[in-house]
Image (cartoon, grey):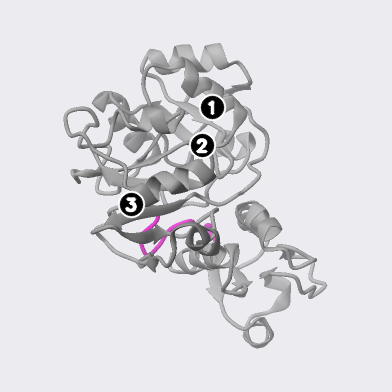
Amino acid sequence: MAQIGTDIQKASSLLQQGELVAIPTETVYGLAGNALDVDVVAKIFAVKNRPEFDPLIVHVSSLRDAEKYVVDIPKKAERLTKLFWPGPLTLVLKKKNEIIPALVTAGLDTVGIRCPDHPLTRMLLSVLSFPLAAPSANPFGYVSPTSPQHVNAQLGDKIPYILDGGNCPVGIESTIIGFENETPIVYRMGGLSIERIENVIGNVEVRAHSTSNPITPGQLKSHYAPSKKLILGNLDELLQQYPAHSSGILTFSKNYHSPYQRILSPGGNLEEAARNLFQYLRDFDQMPIDVILAELLPEAGLGRAINDRLVRASAG
């Protein structure tokens, strides 16, 4: 298994040697490696068993650092960075082709780039001379990791070190936004709500649909899935079709008094629900159940991103 610790120098040394290190962010744990070294990037794809047509996000320490790797930053994008970087926001920008390897971007001329909001990872990025490519630190398609233990359970035999930043406070991946003819496009809903983005730059187009040719991570139809089958619908109706004693129940706030239930937020708080989502999906895989029955959350704020994850998990 991988060593778990808080040694920035050790993590930095391993990364400089071309190794992979799991890093904490405010969203989920990332499987990080030198984004400028194509051999290291290839190792990320191999360890995750991730298809090479699915691009990676590049993590930087600041807006000034991001400017080294992209052609330009639109004014609306810059306004967003001033408010939400560091934070759960990824910008899709035209890359400088001679710097970012094509493998990182699946051959596209754009790159997803963000500044994560976690003190340990920000400190790590500040001492490195290169940015980090860092998809979620889990086998491709499975539930994203929000703790060091999640990473170790699944990738601990494939990487040497996990930088321990505790549990991720946001709990779902970053929101991804790009610009087409200066029109802001949301490609993946995530830890920064659409409402907060629109308060800064006006209306955005949401294009977070499923596709077999993604231009950003998180666009594939089946993703974020536990190993148990997840069925979405009206829980009262689903419980008439599936035996309660062999079904897991995932609710927003309602209590069905089942031993195999997880309530995302008893008080109906969407931020708490997002923080708990991936942990609870993992919990069901350890229960003696046949299926997971789940309901959609209110389609507002982070509820949109949670629903997106549930829909993709149910497609597995």
How many other residues sit within 10 Å of disc 3, few (<14), some (14-19) or many (≥20)? many
Taken as a whole, is the magenta stretch helix, strand or loop? Answer: loop
Figure quadrant of the N terminus: top right
Farthest residue to the right: give it. Answer: 257
The image quadrant of residue 236 is: bottom right
Give the alpha-carbon distance from disc 1 to disc 2, as whole Å.
7 Å
- The vertical placement of 275 against 202, above or below, is above
> Disc 1 or 3, which lies upstream in sequence?
1
Check disc 3 and give the amino acid type. Answer: Thr
The residue at which mark 3 appears reads as 216
Which stretch is magenta? 218-228
> Disc 2 or 3, which lies upstream in sequence?
2
- The vertical placement of 53 against 3, above or below, is below
Tell which tag, 2 or 3, sits nearer the viewer. Answer: 2
The image quadrant of residue 15 is: top left
Check disc 2 and give the amino acid type. Answer: Pro
